[in-house]
Image (cartoon, grey):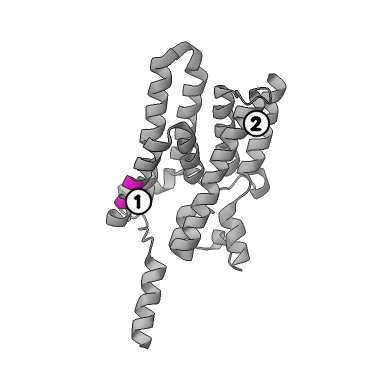
Amino acid sequence: MVYYIIATIVICYLLGNVNNALIISKLKKRDIRECGSGNPGAMNMFRNYGFGFGLLTLVLDALKGVLACLIGWFIVGGFSFTGSILGKYIGAISVIIGHIFPVFLKFKGGKGIASTIGICFMLNPIVALISLVVGFIFILITKMGAVTSFIIITFPLALDAYALATADLTANLPCIIIIFAIYIMTLWAHRTNLMRLFSGTENKTDLFKKLKGKIKKSKNNG
């Protein structure tokens, strides 16, 4: 069991090191770390590369969360299709650590929200989908990216922790601790955003800014 847990941690941490924002921006001949906030994450991709590339980054990062949960579930479960619930959570936190603190990027990665969204879909897909839709509507109205991020992940994580606690608090305590650890890490990763939010200087996120610009330019040329 110990060796399976170690293998899961290592594999999922390395998976977290795969920074899709950086890869996509490099393919576009422009390093995302030199754009906007400098953060190599989905929200900064939305701001600087437009909705399409932002969405692509979000989906790919979310898939990292999904894959990490499956890896942990399968490996810690002894390579059995009955799986391990604890393994799922171990894989989840490992990929988040790898995403926020990637060794190959000198421990300067993204903020973990997109991968956490993928994890939320593995924990409770219906609640995660509802939260995602609510978050999408919220950001369209307010353009507040950081707040939107926590609207999307808070309810699914809190609901899962509650379900685990009411089912069997003692047996599920390690999983509950991992859920709170993931939330605290993403909160910490957003500390500068929250400071700017409270001071009223937080950057706005217009998901369709690039598209609007192209439409406006097309009308002017026409």
3 or 32, nearer to the observer: 3
Residue at point 59%, 57% (across, down): 22
Q: Label 1 neighbourhood size at 10 Å, few (<14), some (14-19), many (20+)?
A: some
180 or 120, nearer to the observer: 120
Instruction: Give me the disc on residue 136.
Output: 1
Up the image or down, 45 lies above or below 196; here it is below
Whether 86 is among the magenta residues is no
**Circle 1: residue type:** Phe
Whether 134 is among the magenta residues is yes
Magenta range is: 133-137
Query: Which residue is the extreme one toward the bottom?
Result: 222
Q: Left or right: 93 with respect to 103?
A: left
Residue 2 x %, y %: 69, 20
Residue 99 x %, y %: 57, 43
Query: Which residue is the extreme one toward the left?
Result: 141
Instruction: Give me the disc on residue 9.
Output: 2
Residue 187 x %, y %: 43, 38
Measured Cα–Cα span from mark 2 to mark 1: 32 Å
Locate the N terminus by quadrant: top right
**Circle 2: residue type:** Ile
Instruction: Give me the disc on residue 190.
Output: none
Residue 64 x %, y %: 57, 43
Q: Left or right: 135 with respect to 83?
A: left
Query: Which residue is the extreme one toward the right?
Result: 3
